[in-house]
Image (cartoon, rainbow, N blue to C red):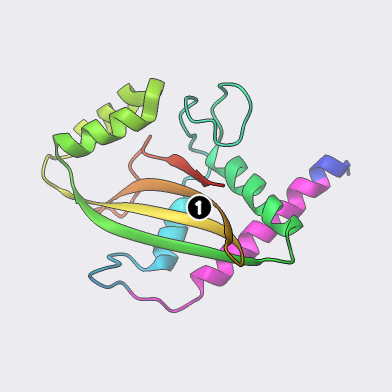
Amino acid sequence: MKLGSMRTLLFTLFALLALFSLAMQPVAATEKQPLAKSRVINILFDNLEDTFPASQACGASGTKAVKVKKYIQTTLGYLAEESSKTVQVEASCESAILDNELIDYYKSIQGSAAKKITNSLRKLKSGITLYQCEVSFNNVAGENTWSRGIQFLISKNSEKAVKHSFRCLMTP
């Protein structure tokens, strides 16, 4: 097995273990957290083949779109290398109403992929409740925090991610 393939396999296993440990924590849904954290993680894993818009660098060079899976692998690989620091995985959601303001927000952040997210959101019924969720991977060392996250929308009715709503979040 090549070194690159072995490394990818190890990063993937580390990612699965880290997310599995978070998913096993008994955190129920509340008004402030409308979906259980384990459910948010499961929905994210159901969408590993989705891509971020090419206009978002997401750690890649050039304007190539990056898959959610590759972004998570790269992020967790970096965190594995920084083993002397505290690693946190967080998941949270807030309720959001589908209206023109939400559509305009997602159009503005999706760049060249704005048409795709607009079409996905327009297929939904105006006024429905969505969840705007975020999963973040944090490396905390004293006052220095490094974080990489993923934000996406989930339909309240189907509990499925809204296609083309994924975006990467990076905090130095």
Q: Is residue 60 magenta?
A: no
Residue 153 is situated, as x and y percent measured from the top left of the image, at 32, 46
- Whether residue 143 sits left or right of residue 83 in the image: it is left
Residue 101 is situated, as x and y percent measured from the top left of the image, at 17, 37
Q: Please tell me which residue is depicted at 36% across the width and 53% down the height of the picture.
A: 133
Is 85 in front, or is 60? 85
The quadrant where residue 19 appears: bottom right
Badge 1: how crowded within 10 Å, few (<14), some, or many (20+)?
Answer: some
Q: Please tell me which residue is depicted at 49% across the width and 34% down the height of the picture.
A: 51
Which residue was labeled with disc 1? 45
The quadrant where residue 92 appears: bottom left
The secondary structure that most of the magenta stretch takes on is helix
Q: Please tell me which residue is depicted at 40% across the width and 59% down the height of the picture.
A: 40
- Whether residue 144 sits left or right of residue 14 in the image: it is left
Element assignment for label 1: helix
Which residue in the rendered view is the most extreme toward the front?
143
Query: In the image, which residues are magenta?
Result: 6-28
Q: Amino acid at mark 1?
A: Phe
Residue 10 vs 89, above or below: the answer is: above
Residue 16 vs 1, above or below: the answer is: below
Which residue in the rendered view is the most extreme toward the left?
127
Residue 148 vs 112, above or below: the answer is: below
